[in-house]
Image: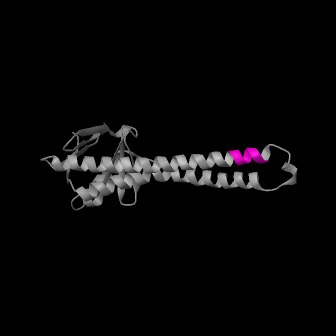
């Protein structure tokens, strides 16, 4: 006999907005390390390119380093523009999604957990997956649940649950799914 647990989560506009903005920042935070490395390379390339070294006076090496430095600057500008454009689009999509959820007559989500799978019934859709295709990561107060091998991400916070339901939910997720790096 399968053991099944159900949780109800009531829609909260501010919590939903905060969770979605957190997830956007979390995803982009990974790219900022790459941006720092490229920034360091840019400084290195430009320094080598513009230093007056007599050995390099009549060679192509300083010009190559200058070119690489300017290409890195262009790449940094491209990534920065991409970040700000996607931030604007994401925040607009978050507001659109919240407006859609506010229009729904049913404001509750239902989470059904059993030993085989998880099912999340929201007012606008139903999502489910087997535990072998689910991973999770706990970042601060947030539990990020990755369904269908990183295709769908759902964010949970303790404030969304009543009483100790969050800890029961978290323990169940930790027991049946795998933690992601």
Q: Is residue 108 left or right of residue 91?
A: left
Query: In front here: 176 or 86?
Result: 86
Residue at 39 percent across and 60 percent down: it is 140
Image coordinates for residue 17, horizontal then vertical, percent: 29, 55
Q: x, y (%) of residue 100?
A: 21, 46
What predominant SS class does the magenta segment belong to?
helix
Kindly tell me whether residue 156 is visible in this rendering: yes
Q: Quadrant of the N terminus?
A: top left
Residue projecting furthest to the left: 105
Counting the numbered discs, the total is 0
* In magenta stretch: residue 163: no
User: Can residue 181 be seen here?
Assistant: no
Q: Residue at x 67, y 55 (%)?
A: 43
> Which stretch did the figure color magenta?
62-67
- At horizontal 29% and vertical 59% (from top left) the residue drawn is 158
Q: Position of residue 169 (x, y in %)?
A: 28, 52
- Left or right position of 82 against 41: left
Does 120 sit above or below residue 162?
above
Q: How is the image coloured?
A: one colour
Q: Nearer the viewer, residue 165 or 38?
A: 38
Left or right: 53, with 175 as reference point? right
Identified at 73% across, 47% down, the residue is: 65
Left or right of 179, for residue 80: right
């Amino acid at each position: 006999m399968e053991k099944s647990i159900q949780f109800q989560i009531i829609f909260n506009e501010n919590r939903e907005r905060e969770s979605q903005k957190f997830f956007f920042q979390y995803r982009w935070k990974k790219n900022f390390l790459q941006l720092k490395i490229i920034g360091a390379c840019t400084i290195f390339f430009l320094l080598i390119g513009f230093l007056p070294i007599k050995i390099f006076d009549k060679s192509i090496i300083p010009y190559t380093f200058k070119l690489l430095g300017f290409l890195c600057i262009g790449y940094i500008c491209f990534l920065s523009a991409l970040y700000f454009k996607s931030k604007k689009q994401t925040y607009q999509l978050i507001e659109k999604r919240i407006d859609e959820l506010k229009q729904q007559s049913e404001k509750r989500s239902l989470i059904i957990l059993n030993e085989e799978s998880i099912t999340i019934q929201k007012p606008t859709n139903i999502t489910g997956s087997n535990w072998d295709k689910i991973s999770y990561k706990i970042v601060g107060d947030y539990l990020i649940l990755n369904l269908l091998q990183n295709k769908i991400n759902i964010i949970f916070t303790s404030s969304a649950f009543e009483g100790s339901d969050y800890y029961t939910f978290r323990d169940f997720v930790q027991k049946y799914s795998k933690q992601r790096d």
